[in-house]
Image (cartoon, rainbow, N blue to C red):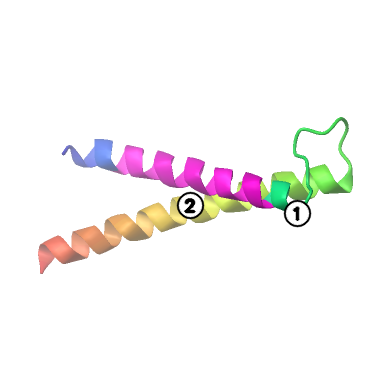
Amino acid sequence: MNQLLLEGLSDAIGFVGGALLGFWLGRLLGLDVFAQGYDNASIFGIVLVGLGGGMGLQGARRWRQRQKDKSSD
């Protein structure tokens, strides 16, 4: 597979997957990201979505690095 395509797809899947996990964790905790106005609960929910997306992206990059290390052995 083209290396740039693999990099783009894995980054996108990692980011979106992590953001969704952050969103659903927030929903489990009773935080509504889409609430009217910006109260503390909605802001904390937005922070969880952002953190989840960032962690998913980093996870995808670590996965790619492990795959690269395995193929070079």
**Quarter containing the N terminus:** top left
- In the image, what residue occupies the spot 84% across and 47% down? 41
| Residue 13 against residue 36 in the figure, above or below | below
- In the image, what residue occupies the spot 89% across and 42% down? 39
Dot 1 falls on a residue whose secondary structure is loop
Where is residue 6? Give x, y as percent: 26, 41
| Residue 39 against residue 37 in the figure, above or below | below
Q: Is residue 38 left or right of residue 57?
A: right
- In the image, what residue occupies the spot 39% across and 44% down? 11
Please tell me whether the stretch drawn in magenta is mainly helix, strand or loop. Answer: helix
Q: Amino acid at mark 2?
A: Gly
| Residue 3 against residue 61 in the figure, above or below | above
Q: Amino acid at mark 1?
A: Leu
Residue position marked by numbered label 2 in the rendering: 56
Where is residue 57? Give x, y as percent: 46, 50
Contact, mark 1 vs mark 2 (Cβ under 8 Å): no
Q: Is residue 42 left or right of residue 49?
A: right
Which residues, given as a range, are shown in magenta?
7-25
User: What is the C-alpha distance between the residues marked 1 and 2?
Assistant: 20 Å
- In the image, what residue occupies the spot 34% across and 38% down? 8
Where is residue 51? Give x, y as percent: 61, 53
Q: Residue furthest front?
A: 28
Tell me which label, 1 or 2, sits earlier in the chain.
1
* In the foreground, 20 or 28: 28
Which of the two marks, 1 or 2, is nearer to us in this view? 1
- For disc 2, the neighbor class at 10 Å (few under 14, some 14 to 19, many from 20) is many
Q: Residue furthest top?
A: 36
Residue position marked by numbered label 1 in the rendering: 29
